[in-house]
Image (cartoon, grey):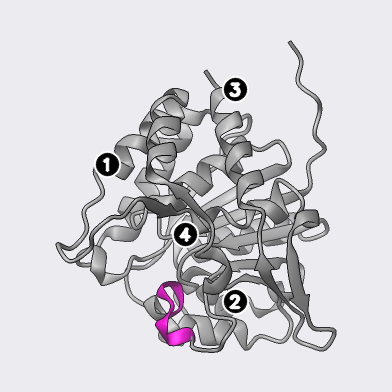
Amino acid sequence: MNMIAVEPRCRLILDNDWAGDPDGLLGLAHHALSPGNELVAVTSSLTNPMFGPPEGMAKVGANFAEDLLSVLKPDEPVSVHAGPDAPFDGQARETAAARAIISAVKAHGHTQVVLVCAGPLTNVADALLLQPDIASMFTLVWVGGSARGDDEEEYNYFTDAAAARFVLDNHQLAVWQFPSETYRRMVISVAELDYSLRNGGPGGVWLWERFNRLEVPDFVKFGPLWCLGDSAPLIVTALDDITCTYEETSAVPYRRIYTSVDTRLIISDFFARLNMQK
């Protein structure tokens, strides 16, 4: 039976610390399965030291992303590129991730290009330092920071604060932000997550195993809810933000800050797309 055709909305670059919290990989799966997206590049960033020594973790994350995509088998193959394991220091670095971002933006810059970063902004900063002129050629959608201004307390910001400051200070770059006050409300019960992944076909089972093998410090204790904050950008890439709210500035630099997202719309769409892969 044919599906209702969905018109593509944007060309998409995805960046995240794929070896960290597996909600990022869930977001990758959702983006890859969504006909509203044309996924053109995936890049992998360093992880916070809470997940262990960061050396080699960007490559580990890239391997996770590649493995997941091989299970999902998207219509068009997409390459995955690892960034550095050290935070941004203001010095130009020729990394595979930075070059992939630059190439993807320049190849598709005449159309709507969206770079979704749901982790530290390391690779974005490296790309902008190497090639400053790309700043006006894409929209950055970032899961991170705080609407209240206490950015240093937020995970994605403090993992690489120097990168965040460098990127957000760029007046040529349009930024749509999902701050902590918004993305932390993007929650699902552990029971629904467990059941839906285990019964979600090969992709769901792959994700279920990653959630269950996650290694965290002993002081981290899981409760009955799991935050899927990295999936919040789906509302502006694969879906539509008509049921959400945001604030925006008319001055330079252009900023849009999402104050609410339709959690149920995003989650139900994801599990429906997983089940359609069976």
Q: Secondary structure at mark 3?
A: loop
Q: Is residue 206 above or below residue 98?
A: above
> From mark 1 to mark 4, how far is it between C-alphas?
20 Å
Q: Amino acid at mark 4?
A: Asn
Few, some or many residues within 10 Å of mark 4 (<14, 14–19, 20+): many
Q: Please tell me which of labels 1 and 4 falls first in the chain.
A: 4
Asked if the residue at tag 1 contacts the one at tag 3, i.e. Cβ–Cβ closer than 8 Å, the answer is no
Asked if the residue at tag 4 contacts the one at tag 1, i.e. Cβ–Cβ closer than 8 Å, the answer is no
Question: Which residue corresponds to mark 4?
Answer: 16
Q: Secondary structure at mark 4?
A: strand
Few, some or many residues within 10 Å of mark 1 (<14, 14–19, 20+): few
> From mark 2 to mark 3, how far is it between C-alphas?
38 Å
The residue closer to the viewer here, 250 or 101, is: 250
Disc 1 or disc 2, which is closer to the eye?
Answer: 1
Q: Please tell me which of labels 3 and 4 falls first in the chain.
A: 4
Marking on residue 128: 2
